[in-house]
Image: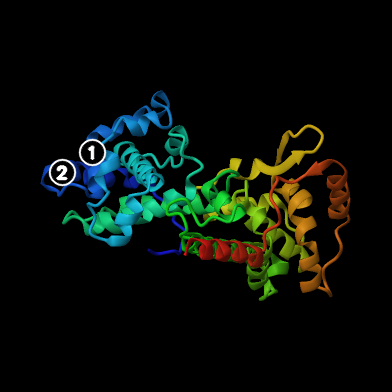
Amino acid sequence: MESAAGEVTFDCSYGQEAQRWLSTVYAAMDKMPAGKLFALLKPSITVLADQPSTLGPFTAFESLPTTVRLLTGAIADARVASLASNQTLQLALLTCAVELTHYCTTGAATFPDVTSKLGQHTAGLDIWEAAQHFLHYLAAESTIPMADSVSNYLLFMRMKVVESLAWQTGSSLYQAICEGGGGSCCPGDYALVYSFLDGVNALAKTRVSAVAARVAAVSAGLSKSPAFGDDCVWLMEAVLQEHLDLLFDQHLSNMVACCVYATARAHGVALSFKKITDTIMQTFPHHDTQDFNHADLGAESATGKTRSGDTRQLYNEIFLPRMEASLQEKFSSTYQHDAVASEVSSKQALGFKRAPLKSLSATDMNTRLTRFGKMQS
């Protein structure tokens, strides 16, 4: 399975092509072998896409009882057959089928709305894996060519999982990393987490590099600094390697904005967060202002109430207090201490706390996953 999660620029005008593809699949359904992934795209599944909230999270899946048996022992690939015996992956495969059918019948790229209505919003890691199975096996199982819009939508789903869905507290990824597990698709398969994080790393570096280039192109100060783009990538890598927990309950692009802002400041250039987030939305049109106005700021110690704010607040209250030491070490001759960050750090120590997740470095995570892998072997 491919692990890279690249940028996907999705064009909703492809909807008619997807509708034609699904109609062709329905017409040929009777001639297809039983037990294939195509069987999940049956017309009756449209009720789950059209009315998921009326069925409830698990009742919806139970309404297609034969689905549980469709994949078990029916796929020639040994690895997929073993994965298909796991109910968690079966639910993820069915969720992908519902999302894909919803897109093909409506032309609306709404993922993960239907997934959330089906109660599968915490299964991001499993859906990421399942979408890749669809990409591989829908192309291999039939002589019907997969429409570009269909494969692109599956890639779009995987990208959305990487940038936000998988990072929710309580998600399968959260449990795998924090509890030492290896992913709920296949217990003990800690390689899945490594593969996913490879995808996170690829997407994060691609995105921060693209945003840095566009920001620098219209900034007189940054256009004269050839190292700016590489420095932005360095800071993002520092987040991923030593402070992975910063991604939980956040949108990846909030971290991108923080990295670009902090690096510009280290280069002596003042940028507004609005300029950076506008650049992100222009470069990657699937974003909107909501992605940058609802950052998680942790819980208040006294009340336990979750606080949210915009990207600037996230930077001042969460990102900078954690990353300023790295910035000072990297840019020792140019970086100036941020008094706002120091004040916020003191305030947090007195009254606020981050979500209940320990700071995770790459070393910590590798130790957890390696230990879990040895336990399962």
The numbered disc on residue 29 is: 2
The percent coordinates of residue 205 (x first, y second) are 57, 65
Residue 91: quadrant of the picture: top left
Structural crowding at the residue carrying mark 1, measured as other residues with C-alpha within 10 Å and reported as few (<14), some (14–19) or many (≥20): some
The numbered disc on residue 227 is: none
Structural crowding at the residue carrying mark 2, measured as other residues with C-alpha within 10 Å and reported as few (<14), some (14–19) or many (≥20): some
Pointer 1: what residue? 42
- Which of 310/154 is in front? 154
Amino acid at circle 2: Met
- Point 43% across, 31% down: residue: 57
Q: Earlier in the sequence, mark 1 or mark 2?
A: 2
- Identity of the residue furthest to the top in this view: 54
- Which of 264/126 is in front? 126
- Point 42% across, 54% down: residue: 186
How is the protein colored in the picture? rainbow
- Point 21% across, 56% down: residue: 141
Q: Is 307 displayed left or right of 251 in the figure?
A: right
Residue 257 showing in the rendered view: yes
Residue 49 showing in the rendered view: no
376 to 44, vertically: above or below = below
**Badges 1 and 2: C-beta atoms under 8 Å apart?**
yes
Amino acid at circle 1: Lys
